[in-house]
Every structure is written in C-alpha cells, then in structure tokens.
Amino acid sequence: MRTYRQAYTRNGKTFRVVKWYCEIECPDGARRALPAFTDREASAAFGRKIQKLAERAASHEEPAGELLRFLEDLPDATRARLASWGILDPSRIVRGRPLWELDPTDPEKKRRIGHAAEYLDTLHAAEVSEEHCKELGACIGKYANVLPGAARPAPRP
C-alpha cells in the first residue's frame, strides 16, 4: 500500500490535487487507487485498513472486530467500489441498508426507500397490478413494524 497525491498539468503548470490517494493491491493482484482524505496520516491509516481487508479477502477470511466497525462507517459508494474490486463480498453492501424507511430527500415525507421499496418498484416495472403492489406493501409494512429495531413505515393520515 502506498499513499500519494495525484498531479496534473494545465496550461504548462503542474498542480497537485487536494486529496491523498491510497494504492491498494487487490486480491486479484491488480493495484488500484482509492481517494482518501486531505490529511496524509489519516489517508495512510485508511489505506492500511483497506489493505488489511484486501489481505483477508485474498485468504477468504471474513473481516472481524475493528475492521467490521470500520466497514460499517464507510460510505456506500466506497463499499460498492471495494466489492467491485473483490475486496468485499457484494452482499455486504446491502446488509446495512434498512428494510423500510422514509426518504430523507422527500419534503412531503411520503416516499419510502430501502429493500422493500426497491422490491415494490421492481414489481411496478414488471407491470404487476397496482392492487397487488398495494397489498404487498401493506404486508411488508406490517412485517417491518414487528421487527425489533426496524425502521417503521409512516403512519397513515
């Protein structure tokens, strides 16, 4: 693993980007760069943890302890990138997502997101009847209410 800052040239002048990058050796032997932080030490620590994940993936071991907590805090885009490189199991990307929750970007608080919402969207795309989709949505909503710690659907007005 190495940490570096990329440089680029514009109009004959050389500039360095603000972020540091970590070059990781993936389980397939390829070396790939991952953007990290603006601080070199934080970027190096980040790179060391990602390299440990890559080594564990190469030896077919699951991450544990501190690495597991580190994974939980990673942004979804970073986890998706690591999964595409073979460092993470692709199923780990969706494990942390809720079954059902309100979309924080919806000002009217009517749109739901999560696994269940994606499933219902898939049914709509497959041209399943609206009645059937509403029925399934109600069943999923009831199921989400009985799961301990599950995000609750919005109450009906």
Image (spheres, helix red, strand yellow):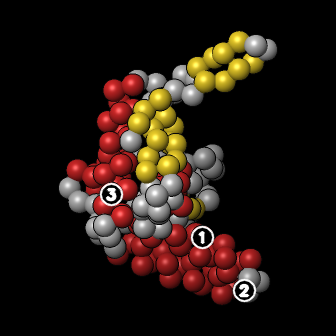
Observer able to see residue 56: yes
Front of the two marks 2 and 1: 1
- Secondary structure, mark 3, is helix
Q: Split into 4 quadrants, where in the image is the C terminus?
A: bottom right
Q: Which mark is residue 118?
A: 1
Residue 36: give x, y in percent of width and height: 46, 35
In this orientation, which residue lies closer to the viewer: 7 or 128? 7
In this orientation, which residue lies closer to the viewer: 52 or 72? 52
Name the residue located 36 percent from the left edge and 39 percent from the top edge. Answer: 46
- Secondary structure, mark 1, is helix
Q: Is residue 79 left or right of residue 132?
A: left
Specify which label sits upstream in the sequence, 2 or 1: 1
Q: Split into 4 quadrants, where in the image is the N terminus?
A: top left
Callout 1 touching callout 3 (CB < 8 Å): no
Against 26, residue 20 (above or below) is above
Name the residue located 49 percent from the left edge and 78 percent from the top edge. Answer: 140
Name which residue type carries label 1: Glu
Q: Is residue 106 left or right of residue 64?
A: right
Q: Quadrant of residue 56?
A: bottom left
Q: Which mark is residue 128?
A: 2
Q: Quadrant of residue 113?
A: bottom right
CA separation, marks 2 and 3? 45 Å
Q: Which mark is residue 55?
A: 3
Residue 86: give x, y in percent of width and height: 47, 63
Observer able to see residue 76: no
Q: Residues within 10 Å of mark 2 (few under 14, many from 20)?
A: few
Specify which label sits upstream in the sequence, 2 or 3: 3
Against 27, residue 133 (above or below) is below
Q: Residues within 10 Å of mark 3 (few under 14, many from 20)?
A: some
Front of the two marks 1 and 3: 3
Residue 78: give x, y in percent of width and height: 49, 49
Name the residue located 34 percent from the left edge and 26 percent from the top edge. Answer: 41
